[in-house]
Amino acid sequence: MTERAGYTVTMFLVDVSPSTGKLREVDVPLPNGEVQIVEMTNLEWALQYVKLKVQEMIYNGRKTDQCGVILFGTQETSNIVNRKDGGYEHVYEFVPIGTPTAATIAKINSICPAEEIGDPVDALIVGVETQDRYLGNKKTWTRKIVMLTDGENPIELEDWEVAIDKMNDLKIKLTVVSQPSRGIDFDDADFGYKEEDKSTIKRANEEFFHTFVDRLDPDLGIVGNCAFAIEEVSRPEVKQTKSALMANVLRLGDVENHPEEAIEIVVKTSKCTAFARPKSFKKFARLGDEDEDIIMRNTDDDVDELTANYGQLSMQTQYVYDPSGAHEDDDGEVKEEEPEQKKELVEIDKEDLVRGYKYGSSYVPVPDGNFPKLETKKGIEICGFFPEKNLRPELSMGEVHYVWADPASPLQQVAMSSIAEAMYVRLLVAIARWVTKDGAEPKMGILKPETHGTVAYFTWVQMPFADDIRKYTFPSLDKLFNHKGEVVTKHPYIATDEQMSAMDDFVDALDLMDAGEKDEEEDRKPWYDITLSYNPAIHRVKQALFHAAIVQDLNRQPLPPPHPELLKYFNAPRKVVKRARGAIEAARTAFNVKEVPKRVVRGRRDGHVRARDDGDDALLLDKQPNKRIKLSKTQSQVLSRTQADASAKSQQKNVTDDSETEPEDDEQDLLLNQKFKGSSRPSSPTDEDRLPTPSQTPVPNDDGRAPGRIIGTVAPLTDFNKNIAHGDLVTKAVEDLAFVIRTVVLRPFSASRVDEMLECMQALRKVCLEEDEIDAWNEFLPDLRRACLDDDPGNEFFWTKLAALGRSVSLISKSEAAQQGGKSDISDADAEQLYSTFVPSRTVLVN
């Protein structure tokens, strides 16, 4: 029998013996990834588990989810068994069974270690009896008992067999959570911990609790430690709900006018899914003096000063309008009001307003009562059938409802099953009109047949109306036209065969269907599991609420980072990222991907920008004609003077410094020249002041590094060795050096750098072999071969020089990888064959 949502009574049995007051150090994770050590008693740490469980009940908000707290080891004795039969001393019913509230958390926070030694068996018997008397004959309710003890005190082994028999009869689920003693919990094989030097009493108590749990029926008992229990209760968990069955009628045909040709079936409906949102927060604000006086006068108790200064905001609606209306000039454009002009708004009553509906750019007033409501009748009416293959899946994204046959009527079940089975066999779905009650607004949706074993039923999901679907069209990606109507075959917007192939490889490399863990048959499972993914917004807010409820000092114990399960799918698996590295580089090269420069926003001269017309983007594919910009006299004089100064500085620098690097000032001349060449702004007296000075002009890097790269094209081997020396940039350095080699080799006039690139190839292969980057090398070398020999223009001369080096720069085989402790899928024969199959297509002169 499945467990009902709610309808559960949980008894918490907390050991407050003197041994639970010992101090311990707890590692508290901080949001920045660091760990803070907080000192607290063993009881305080164990009570966090109780408060988390109670807060979960408060958060779910079910009145049928109840709990009670019983303390053992207290000086007082107050329990239901002692009042009737006596005995069971030092057991105190601290929180009676009931629906928990914030007051329950506050009461649990007041629990402190006591002076007496409590007996866990006495507390267990009192908890079972208290729970049984409260529930009475409610056999469908779930009964749970959670015991928290450090196991450091002797146990009187009396009547424990009787307690086991009664717990088995009542199907009570027992969880024993050990409070840490000297920072140590009970042994837990699942948590991976075993204590070696535990006390004799604790070892005997642990054996007793394991024996006690083993005597219970299967799945009714568990023993664990507190650290693992707190970790598990903090794990994201989906709130399980059981929807109530609602009566309705399923109709097929016109029941009123043609009853002999229609069918009417009594059905029950329930929710399959429900939309969940994060918990909302109430808004507070600082109160004014008048508000504070009102609070102080209406409050008899002393009000804290901090509390009195803030109050909860209440929602209010006020209707106002501007009697002055819009101000327009002669051209019909709306004028902007000056900041000092304050609008005088007139407040009006809601009764003076008339509802209006927008029609185009105007509003149509529709007074209440002018349009009668649509007369609807409760029921689910099937309007028609169509093939399931024609159903667009992206449109059925709303909440899903079940439609069941009436459980109390076999005739209704047979009738509905016949319709569902017929639709299921013929692969049909139905358009259905759903009305929840007479006079309610109808909803249109899709009825889809489902079968589960011998049960046939429907699922219904609401579909959007045609007016609510936004259709965004865009021109063809592979068929473009110019102004003359001619088809354009070559254009930056038309993908080439190389780009299409690179994108296909890139998409295939990102396949996640085999990126998960291995199953029992050693087959890879999909990486993403929808049942194990959680909404970060919902569960992070929930974690913050729980933490604030169980921790009294947030400065001492700040909110910890999100649970690892919440971040499970935030980052792509490393295996896929490594596998897709070559495809990413190939796609980046094929599409010539570059970093987009940061756009510098210019200040507006007149504070007004003309809106874009609808026809501005009509000629998207056509190049705008270059406009010659004529410099004004002021700009020409400033530019000439600036270039002359820069030229003089450059000549002086060349005399004093015999360097091959282009002077900085020459770069500045180019920047200045470009600035005036692309500017269409009219001259002004302040243009000279706006020119960038040599110290302000950014100087581009002269090491040839592309954006995001750590290896440059000027001295790649030097950059590579420097990054390898750091030790933590090996993968990035290997990736970037391979990119640089490919870039330089495929450039025109690259023959002068052949020897340098061969040296880089040798260094790259050595690092890949020693640093477990074998896959990166084995993917890079075939790609370089295709680029040199198959692509146009390629570089057959470089590949011939590389082939002359032979096996030392070929693929890394299994035997070579095994010597370094790595893995490779390449055999020695394949590695030898890489260069042997190459036959030069033309005579190559080798110096």
Image (tube, grey):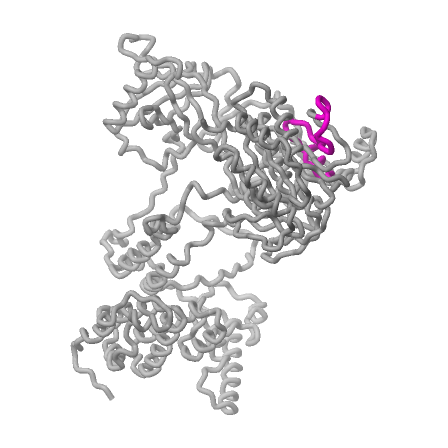
Image quadrant in which you'd find residue 344? top right
Q: Nearer the viewer, residue 378 or 596?
A: 378
The image shows residue 415, relative to residue 111, as above or below, that is above
As displayed, is residue 557 above or below residue 436?
A: below
- In the rendered structure, does residue 213 fall within the stretch colored magenta? no
In the picture, which quadrant includes the C terminus? bottom left
* Residue at image location 73% in from the left, 36% down from the top: 311
> Which quadrant: the N terminus?
top left
User: Where's residue 840, x and y in %?
Assistant: 18, 77
Numbered circles on residues, count: 0
Residue at position x 36%, y 37% in the image? 394
**Vertical position of residue 480 compared to residue 46: above or below:** below
Residue 821 placement (x, y as % from top left): 37, 70
- Left or right, 184 with respect to 583, comes to right
Residue at x-position 35% and y-position 69%: 774
787 lies above or below 324: below
Residue 422 lies left or right of residue 819; in this view the side is: left
What percent of the width, then of the height, locates residue 545? Answer: 62, 41
Q: Does the stretch in magenta take in 108? A: yes
> In the rendered view, does 670 fall on the left or right side of 353?
left
Residue 587 position, x and y percent, is: 33, 61
Residue 384 in view: yes
User: What residue lies at 47% left-to-right and 77% top-to-bottom?
Assistant: 722
The residue segment tinted magenta is: 82-111
Using the image as rendered, state which of residue 746 and residue 689 is in the foreground: 746
